[in-house]
Image (cartoon, helix red, strand yellow):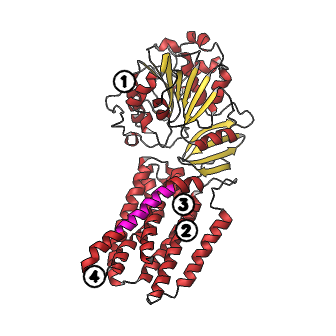
């Protein structure tokens, strides 16, 4: 029974370690398919090596205490991951800008060795458990089923229970302590079988028990939320909160009077502590350019809350506006209210839901829809497809418009993802308008001596405005400003809006070499060329 428990819990630990590995890599390399591909590929490779070595060594040294020794070494390697992860990830992140390379190397350095040792469990167990050649098939099937069942438990327990309830480091410590307990169990069982060198069983058991007790007493198995220097090297200043949610590694930090919110490796937004209604993040006020198409909105929808900068701006600008917000992560709402002064307001209705699911559920029509769920390291593909945009269009009132913040470039090596998204918007909406950051292309009013056909190849926050009806570029001209600003736009001045409108790109955007994004085919990660810029979402 002890050997079967080792097989089952070994599978639990290996899969739990793989799941939590994504949170260890995310602050440095993001949470894209490349990161998950690195994790899955390295773990499978390491397990394959472990299976081979385990089978070979089990034939040579068929003793349970040898397997227990492997588990003890694996435990020490796992317990060292929290200390090693930050320096390893920072070193590789700085030297390999491509997250495919950085994430692959980091996964190999941090996880390959303990996973190889965990891979020796099943072949060793088959060798030790089999009593005769006639029953080896049944024994092997039973043990591999136990290992797989343990992996299933590790997957669900980590995703549904441990990550929401504990800090990542504490989960890793728990896994290491569990391996120590398994090693101790192996030594004790080997002693009962009178195997050689099994006298380490009692000391190992005591060490493992002490580790679990210390972990429970001093860390309380809870997430770390006290101020400390951020381990991700983001230079965001003093950390006020750091925790792992169901969807992100979330950090709130403050520096020089500015408070920042970061998900994984992307800054999501910020506010001035002394003026909570204002943000130093420039793309937020730039999104108000969509108000030139719909200057009197009665109902609006925002997909993606972040620190709540855009809701604060809209509610201040339009006292009678009803604003719905779809935010998938409940922890983000708590952080926005607790750290970024998001008000409790009857006009503001926050729905903890995926943006697409919220639209599918149906509801009132909207004059404006703002999409702020696309960010630098990972984009939810289901919020980019033609099917989603068609649903979005169906939820607009006549004269309604969509305003999306998209990171990318209009031309050049970094433009393919944006151009695919632009192509998809054009397939659904009659009017699609792209606004570059005026600082990257010069300034001036649209239709005048401004950006016009000057396309920037620099990655930036591009503002895409789409309308059910084609309006023409004159809708964003200086003559439209008095109408667009009839209500005023809080702390965004007329001069500001004129400057933002001056980023309208009037040239041709090439789309023949990029795909139309659909639910069936949306290769966002392969379209996204890696770059290193200070961008927000």
Mark 1–mark 4 distance (CA, rounded to whole Å): 66 Å
Q: Earlier in the sequence, mark 3 or mark 2?
A: 2
Q: Quadrant of residue 38?
A: bottom left
Mark 3–mark 2 distance (CA, rounded to whole Å): 11 Å
Q: Earlier in the sequence, mark 1 or mark 3?
A: 3
Mark 1 lies on residue? 427
Q: Earlier in the sequence, mark 1 or mark 4?
A: 4
In the rendered structure, find residue 79 and report the number of the disc placed on it: 2
Labels 3, 2: front one: 2
Mark 1–mark 3 distance (CA, rounded to whole Å): 44 Å
Note whether 153 is above or below 451 in the view shown. below
Residue 180 image position (x, y, % from top left):
53, 74
- Quadrant location of the N terminus in the rendered image: bottom left
Identity of the residue drawn at 50% across and 20% down: 401
Mark 4 lies on residue? 132
**Tag 2 secondary structure:** helix
Residue 55 image position (x, y, % from top left):
33, 76
**Tag 4 secondary structure:** loop
Q: Is residue 146 magenta?
A: yes
Mark 3 lies on residue? 85
Part of the protein shown in magenta: 144-158
Frontmost residue, 74 versus 127: 127
């Amino acid at each position: 029974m002890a050997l079967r428990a080792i097989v089952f819990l070994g599978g639990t630990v290996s899969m739990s370690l793989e799941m939590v590995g994504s949170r260890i890599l995310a602050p440095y390399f993001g949470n894209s398919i490349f990161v998950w591909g690195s994790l899955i590929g390295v773990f499978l490779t390491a397990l394959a090596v472990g299976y081979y070595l385990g089978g070979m060594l089990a034939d040579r040294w068929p003793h349970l205490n040898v397997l227990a020794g492997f588990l003890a070494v694996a435990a020490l390697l796992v317990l060292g991951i929290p200390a090693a992860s930050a320096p390893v990830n920072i070193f590789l992140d700085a030297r390999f800008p491509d997250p495919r390379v950085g994430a692959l190397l980091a996964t190999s350095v941090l996880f390959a060795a303990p996973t190889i040792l965990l891979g020796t469990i099943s072949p060793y167990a088959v060798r030790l458990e089999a009593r005769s050649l006639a029953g080896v098939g049944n024994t092997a099937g039973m043990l591999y089923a136990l290992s797989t069942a343990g992996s299933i438990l590790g997957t669900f327990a980590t995703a549904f229970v441990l990550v929401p309830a504990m800090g990542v480091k504490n989960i890793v410590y728990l896994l290491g302590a569990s391996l120590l307990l398994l090693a101790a169990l192996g030594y004790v069982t080997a002693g009962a079988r009178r195997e050689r060198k099994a006298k380490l069983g009692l000391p190992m058991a005591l060490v493992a028990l002490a580790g679990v007790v210390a972990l429970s007493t001093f860390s309380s198995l809870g997430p770390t939320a006290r101020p400390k220097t951020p381990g991700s090297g983001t230079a965001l200043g003093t950390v006020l909160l750091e925790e792992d949610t169901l969807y992100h590694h979330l950090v709130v930090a403050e520096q020089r009077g500015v408070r920042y919110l970061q998900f994984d490796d992307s800054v999501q937004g910020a506010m001035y502590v002394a003026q909570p209604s204002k943000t130093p993040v420039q793309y937020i006020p730039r999104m108000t350019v969509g108000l030139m198409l719909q200057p009197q909105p009665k109902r609006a929808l925002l997909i993606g809350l972040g620190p709540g900068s855009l809701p604060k701006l809209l509610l201040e600008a339009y006292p009678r506006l009803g604003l719905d917000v779809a935010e998938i992560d409940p922890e983000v709402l708590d952080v926005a209210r607790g750290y970024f002064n998001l008000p409790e307001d009857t006009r503001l209705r926050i729905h903890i839901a995926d943006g697409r699911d919220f639209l599918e559920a149906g509801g009132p029509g909207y004059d404006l829809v703002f999409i702020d769920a696309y960010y630098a390291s990972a984009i939810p593909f289901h919020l980019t497809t033609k099917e989603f945009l068609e649903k979005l269009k169906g939820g607009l009132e006549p004269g309604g418009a969509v305003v999306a913040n998209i990171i990318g470039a209009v031309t050049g090596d970094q433009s393919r993802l944006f151009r695919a998204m632009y192509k998809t918007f054009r397939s659904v909406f009659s009017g699609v308008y792209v606004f570059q950051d005026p600082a990257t292309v010069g300034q001036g009013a649209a239709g005048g001596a401004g950006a016009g056909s000057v396309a920037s190849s620099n990655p930036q926050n591009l503002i895409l405005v789409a309308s059910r009806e084609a309006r023409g570029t004159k809708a964003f001209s200086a003559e439209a400003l008095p109408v667009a600003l009839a209500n005023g736009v809080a702390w965004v001045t007329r001069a500001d809006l004129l400057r933002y409108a001056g980023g309208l790109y009037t040239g041709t955007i090439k789309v023949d070499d990029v795909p139309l994004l659909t639910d069936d085919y949306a290769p966002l990660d392969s379209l996204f060329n890696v770059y290193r810029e200070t961008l927000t979402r």
